[in-house]
Amino acid sequence: MNMASTALSLAALGHETRLTIFRLLVRAGNDGLNIGEIGDHLGMAASTLAYHLKTLVDAGLVTQERQGRQIMNRVDFDVMHQTLSFLTAECCTGVTLTQEDAA
């Protein structure tokens, strides 16, 4: 994971509705949920959900799979873990500032 893909993931999660959808899908686990089920849980219209899910899919955080007439939505847990790992990879390693850095 690099800076650009991490920024894209965080931007997608930076909206309250998308963050709510994502957290619901995390709770659903690998089984995922279809748009109707997400709407039932969150009380949102299918068109609103489709718009926000597209952003999460474009960021790589959610995958969609057609099963007959329904589209199942699932968190890509690998991408989620990569995003979190990128954010914490240098935790507590310290920061030094040299005279050259400051200039």
Image (cartoon, rainbow, N blue to C red):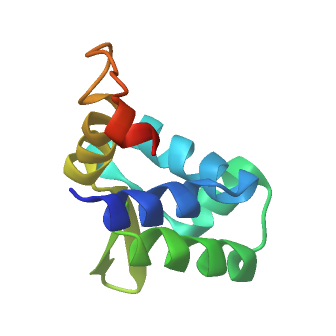
Query: Residue 81 in the image: x percent, y percent?
Result: 26, 40
Confirm whether residue 87 shows in the render: no
* Residue at image coords 64%, 81%: 51
Give the vertical position of 30 relative to 9 (above or below).
Answer: above
Tell me: 94 left or right of 38. left
* Image coordinates for residue 49, horizontal then vertical, percent: 66, 72
- Which residue is located at x 33 percent, y 65 percent? 5
Q: Is residue 55 above or below residue 9?
A: below
In the image, 9 versus 21, the foreground residue is 9
Residue 12 position in % (x across, y down): 55, 63
Residue 84 at what x, y percent from top left? 33, 37
Does residue 57 appear in the picture of this structure? yes
In which quarter of the view is residue 60 placed? Answer: bottom left
Q: Residue at x 45, y 66 (%)?
A: 8
91 vs 16, left or right, is left
Which residue is more in the foreground, 93 or 73? 93
> Which picture quadrant has residue 43?
bottom right
Image: 50 above or below 85: below
Q: Quick check: 19 left or right of 2?
A: right
Quadrant assignment for the N terminus = bottom left
Please state if 13 lies on the left or on the right of 64 as rendered.
right
How many numbered callouts?
Answer: 0
Which residue is nearer to you in this view: 95 or 77? 95
Occupied quadrant, residue 38: bottom right
Q: Residue at x 37, y 60 (%)?
A: 61
Q: Looking at this view, is 100 or 37 the one in front? A: 100
